[in-house]
Amino acid sequence: MADQHDPHSGLHSERGALAGEHPGRAANPVIKVHDLAWLEFEKPDLARAEVFARAFGFTTTLSTGHELHLRGTDPGAPCVLVREGARSKFRGPAFRAAAPGDVLRLADATGRKVTGLPGTLGGVSVDLPDPSGLRVRVVSGTDELAALPPQDPQVLNFGHEVGRVNAAQRPPRAPARVQRLGHVVLQTTKYRQTLDWYLQHLGLIVSDFLFHPRRRGRGPVMSFIRCDRGATPADHHTLALLLGPANRYVHSAYQVADLDALAAGGEYLRERGYHHSWGIGRHIEGSQLFDYWRDPDGFMVEHYSDGDLFDNTLEPGWAPMTASGLAQWGPPATADFLGVKPGKASLRELRAVFSALREDNEFDAQRFLGLLKVARS
C-alpha cells in the first residue's frame, strides 16, 4: 500500500497507460522535428532584458536597440530572440526540422507558405497556428554559430571514488554559462486538441502524463513531450503542455554544466536583486536539477542540469498531479511557481478562470476544482 501514496516510488514506466488511454504519439505524423531551435519574445526595454540575460548566463550575438539575440555555448542558432514591443509578450517557439525537406512537406500538408528568415538567422521557416492560437515555427537551414568555450563541470569526489586530490573546491560565484535551450512549458485551454496537434504535425511523443488526483478517468491534464529521434536519446521533454484557464507561456529551461554552476549562478543572480521563484531541487518527471527565476518582465526561466534522456522505445508514464509530487527533494513548491501568489499575475489568472468557465473549452468547473486540489496538495 505504501507505494500507492509515495510519489517517489514507481517514477515512470511502472505507472503505464490503462486500456483505452491516450497512446502518447501519432500513428503517422507529418514530420518529426529534431529539437527546439529558439523562443521568441517581445519586451519594451531591451537594455534591461540584456543585463538580466547576461547575469542569467546568456551570450549576446546581436543587440541593435530593436532586436536582441541570446545564445548558449553549444553550437547552433541563438536560444532566444527578443524584439522591441510596447508590452512584454511571448511570441512563440521555433522547432528545428530533422531534414531540409521537412519544412516544405509540412507546408504542403497544411497549406502554408515557406518563407525566408532574416539574414541574421538564415534559412527558411513555415509558420503554423496551434489550436491555442500560438504561432509555431518550424525552421531549416539556419546559420550555425560556432561553439563557445564551455563552463567545465567541477571535478568531484564520489564517496571513495577520488577524482580531486591536493586541490580545494571553489566554484566561482559567477553567471552559470547557459549551454542550450532545453524546453518550454505552455498552458492551454484546449489541452487535448493542442496535444494531438503537436504529436500529429511535429511528430513529438509523450514521456509522461499527469492527471488530477482521483480523476484519471477524465484523462490527462499535463504532458511532458519529447522529440522522436528513433534510437538516439532525446531530452525527456522539449515541450510540456498544461491544461489551464488561459493560453500562456509558463516557463522555459536552459541547461547548465552541473549543480555547482546552477547554485553559484543562482547566488550571483540573488546578489543582484533578481527574483527567485523556486529551487534548488530535483524534479520527478524529467529528473533534472532545477532552479527557477523571474526576469524583470515577469517571465519565469529555469536553470537545469542532469535531465533524463529517452529514446523512442519508452512508453508514457502516468502519475497524479500534485504540488508535493513536483520534486524528489528540495523546498516545497512556492506560491509564485504555482501561480497563486497574491498579486497582478494571480489576479489575471483568476479573471481568466471566470472567462474560461463561460467559454466552450476543456477547462470546466471540475477541472478548476481539480486544479485547486493540486495547488493544495
Image (cartoon, rainbow, N blue to C red):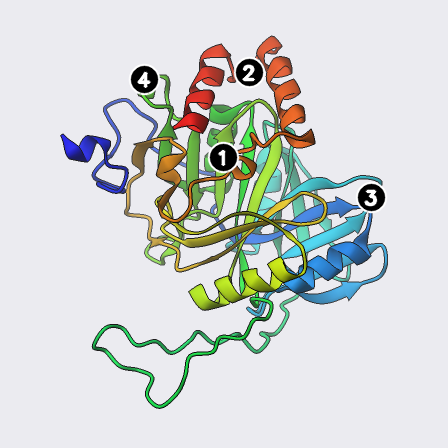
Element marked by disc 3: loop
Residue carrying label 4? 217
- Residue 329 spot, x, y in % from top left: 35, 48
Q: Label 2 sits on what residue type? A: Asn
Q: Label 1 sits on what residue type? A: Leu
Q: Residue at x 61, y 58 (%)?
A: 270
- Residue 310 spot, x, y in % from top left: 33, 52
- Residue 342 spot, x, y in % from top left: 62, 29
Q: Is residue 153 above or below residue 43?
A: below
Q: Label 4 sits on what residue type? A: Gly
Element marked by disc 2: loop
Mark 1 or 2, nearer chain start: 1
Alpha carbons under labels 4 and 3: distance apart = 43 Å
Q: Residue at x 86, y 58 (%)?
A: 65
Q: Residue furthest top?
A: 358
Alpha carbons under labels 1 and 2: distance apart = 15 Å
Residue carrying label 2? 361
Residue carrying label 3? 85
